[in-house]
Image (spheres, grey):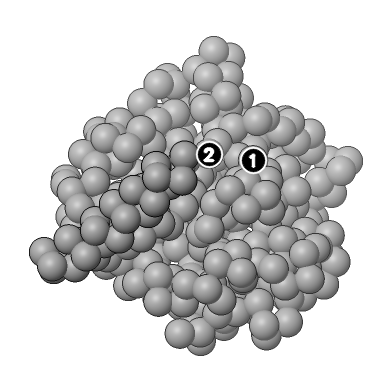
Amino acid sequence: MLRKKFMSAALAVVMSFALSALGMAEPSAPVRLAGLKGPTSMGMVKLLSDNEAGKAKNAYDFVMNASGVELSQKLLAGEVDLAAVPSNLAAVLYNKTSGKIKVIAVNTLGVLYVVSTDESVKSLEDLKGKTIMATGKGQVPEITLRALLKAANIDPDKDVTIEFKSEPTEVVGLLAKDGGIAMLPQPFVTAASAKVNGLRVVLDLSQEWEKLQGSPVVTGVTVVRKDFLDANKDKVDEFLSEDKDSIEYVNANPDEASALIEKFGIVKAAIAKKALPKCNIHYADGEEMKKMLSCYFEVLLKENPASLGGKLPDDEFYYAK
């Protein structure tokens, strides 16, 4: 037994020297990256493609989730290192964990639209008395809709019925079956338009929000576990560089990006190509990120303090390279 242990240790040493002699480094642990099925992952597809080809600076182990809640659980359990999540969820995680989660970049601005097969609906005011299907209960979509309804003198608890579904594909299926009114994010708006006869885009909620608030909706951000950041600052900075390049590539090369979006199981390429110009995939870090989020969070705090975990996140929430 001792001889076997000695031989194993000796072999490990020999392999290490052999790798060094060949000018090769021992492989480092992959960065565990997660995203949601939608625009936050669409912006990463060039990075993911480079990763598959062995061209990325980091080695990434990527997983895509259907809900922010599921993704949060994986973050808190230490099962992922970096994750693209709804912006308000990042603040909740920071506040509820006493700073164990930090935000490192914005990845998506406003992507929400109201669609309808009901021809009487042409404005926010026309939603009064209607039933609206939606996703994102307690997150950016619900908060955005409620704030805009209130601005149109519609009580979201009395004057409309908001029916929340588990994910956008469920809403698309219900629209295809029975029609109706829904709040959907891109690219699912485009997918629904291709499946549902007579479906119209009634409102761009991002435009409505900017008219009301004077600052953009920030839908998605990328966060990191603080303990991973403290031990791997170089990897986090490399990710930010690659993420920025990936988002710029996706916005500049819709044909190639759409093929990759289908390859990674987000939506079909034909849908992605039509949706990309409306997905508001956008990279921001440092002071630009902080300014965007600070303005957006101020509004959310007034609307629903619980949507941020009870308070505005302090300056330590924001990572700067």
Q: Is residue 163 visible?
A: yes
Vertical position of residue 171 compared to residue 224: above or below? above
**Mark 2, residue position:** 65
Question: Are the two marked residues, 1 and 2, in contact with CB atoms closer than 8 angstroms?
Answer: yes
Q: Residues within 10 Å of mark 1 (few under 14, many from 20)?
A: few
Residue 207 visible in the shown view: no
Residue 195 in percent (x, y) is at 40, 21
Residue found 86% across the figure and 43% down from its top: 157
Q: Is residue 110 left or right of residue 134?
A: left
Of helix, strand and loop, which one carries label 1? helix
Asked if 6 appears above or below 246 in the picture, the reply is above
Residue in the foreground of this view, choosing between 269 and 277: 269
* Residue at the spot 65% in from the left edge and 67% down from the top edge: 101
Q: Quadrant of the C terminus?
A: bottom left
Q: Which residue is mark 1?
A: 70
In the image, residue 100 sits, relative to residue 201, either above or below, namely below
Instruction: Give percent across and percent down for residue 299.
Output: 72, 71
Q: Nearer the viewer, residue 154 or 173?
A: 173
> Between residues 29 and 219, which one lies in front from this camera angle?
29
Q: Earlier in the sequence, mark 1 or mark 2?
A: 2
* x and y, in percent, of residue 260 in the image: 24, 42
Q: Position of residue 194 (x, y in %)?
A: 36, 26
Q: Which amino acid is tagged 1?
A: Glu
Which quadrant of the view contains residue 87?
bottom right
**Amino acid type at image mark 2:** Asn
Q: CA–CA distance between discs 1 and 2?
A: 7 Å
Residue at the spot 67% in from the left edge and 83% down from the top edge: 316
Left or right: residue 262 versus residue 235 is left
Q: Residue at x 46, y 46 (%)?
A: 2
Identify the residue at the far right of this view: 158
Q: Of the numbered discs in the image, which one, if any, rests on residue 38?
A: none
Q: What is the residue that sits farthest to the top in this orientation?
A: 177
